Image: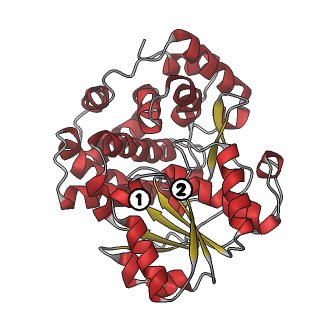
Amino acid sequence: MNFDISTRLYHENNCVLAHSNELCALGTKALIVTGRNSSRKNGSLDDVTAALATHNIPYVVFDKIEENPSVESVVAGAQYGASEIVDFVIGIGGGSPLDASKAIALLIANGKFNKDFLYTPIPNAPHLPIAAVPTTCGTGSEVTGVSVLTLHSSHTKKSISHQIFPEIAFVDSKYLKAAPNQIITSTALDALAHLCESFLHAKSDVKSRKAVEKGLTIWGEAKNDLADHNFTDDVLDKLMSASVFAGIAIRYTGTSIPHGLSYRVTYECKIAHGLACAVFLPPFIENAPANCQKQIMEQLGYNDFFELKNFIARLCNGCEIPRNILELSIGDMLKNKAKLASACYPIDEKMLRTIAEYHC
């Protein structure tokens, strides 16, 4: 099936260098947006700079993107890029640098360097061209228009009010080889949450369900190796592929209840995003219509829901959420009518509490 995504996607070994001409066709000077260390350790930054050098494209690097990037970091990156007169942006890393690169590309193109512009809906606001080089297996940001940023003033995370899609994405699972086991596990759980939340979304349709089916099947093939930390090249490539299909799925639907509940938890408890989502995933699935639950289990290769529940509990071992933080998360969600309406079954306060308090 043709998923009609606007992002040109290359998923192959050494794809950054193999398609350097397309990367360099995006502009005349690049701003590379990344974190402090991982892109240097896994070789992705070297690949990108080598590709740029091949075509004599100058670049500058902004490497101050933290996990769960803040609005403040994005504004600083945009100001730096504007001062260097860049005309395209390359995001390298997990969801944090990729999401930040979108917001930075938006601010530079519009000459705006403040939070208000990020959260003011403006139809078709311009942005600089973006290339995405994912180095984790969960975000799917390379094929979505979403940019989720941390709002310190609200102690939570929130998507900006603009849809910004990368022009091109380079997916190469070799970059996962340098990732710590806990990063691979957490981001893979984020991809699983994307897939299940999309399937159980009120906006689910033929195309999103097809992406979910492909993603869940591939994720299921890698699940036992994921649990055992048996990260062969084939397993890493499957996890990366599942993440891409998960990104395509939420491109059509968006996320739902587990993601909404996770944001306050991630901020207050410093629990990795994927783990925070996964904590709320079993009850979200368990309370869904039986036929939907059955389809998810079949596609993942489980005999019943309890196998999935036990699997997630094993991977999320130690993720304890204090009662007061759960109450804050529930309060946030009760104010978010759009997110409450995103599920394919009714979510009132009683059901929300059933999902949020499941692990207590």
Residue 212: x percent and y percent? 42, 53
As helix, strand or loop, the secondary structure at mark 2 comes to loop
Nearest the viewer among 266 and 145 is 266
Quadrant placement of the N terminus? bottom left
Three-letter code for the amino acid on which mark 2 is drawn:
Asp
From what the image shows, is residue 314 above or below residue 104?
above
**Residue shown at the point (43%, 11%) measured from the top left:** 360
**Residue shown at the point (68%, 76%) measured from the top left:** 87
Q: Which residue is mark 2?
A: 63
Observer able to see residue 127: no
Instruction: Assess whether mark 1 and mark 2 are in contact (beta carbons under 8 angstroms).
Output: yes
Residue 31: x percent and y percent? 60, 68
As helix, strand or loop, the secondary structure at mark 1 comes to helix
Residue 221: x percent and y percent? 22, 52
Nearest the viewer among 281 and 11 is 11
Spatial separation of the CA atoms under disc 2 and disc 1: 9 Å
Three-letter code for the amino acid on which mark 1 is drawn:
Ser
The answer to which quarter of the image holds residue 4 is bottom right
Q: Is residue 151 left or right of residue 307?
A: right
From what the image shows, is residue 15 above or below residue 255?
below
Observer able to see residue 89: yes
Residue 192: x percent and y percent? 39, 44
Nearest the viewer among 149 and 213 is 149
Nearest the viewer among 264 and 101 is 101
Q: Which residue is mark 1?
A: 39
Q: Check disc 2: other Cα within 10 Å, few if <14, some if 14-19, many if 20+.
A: some
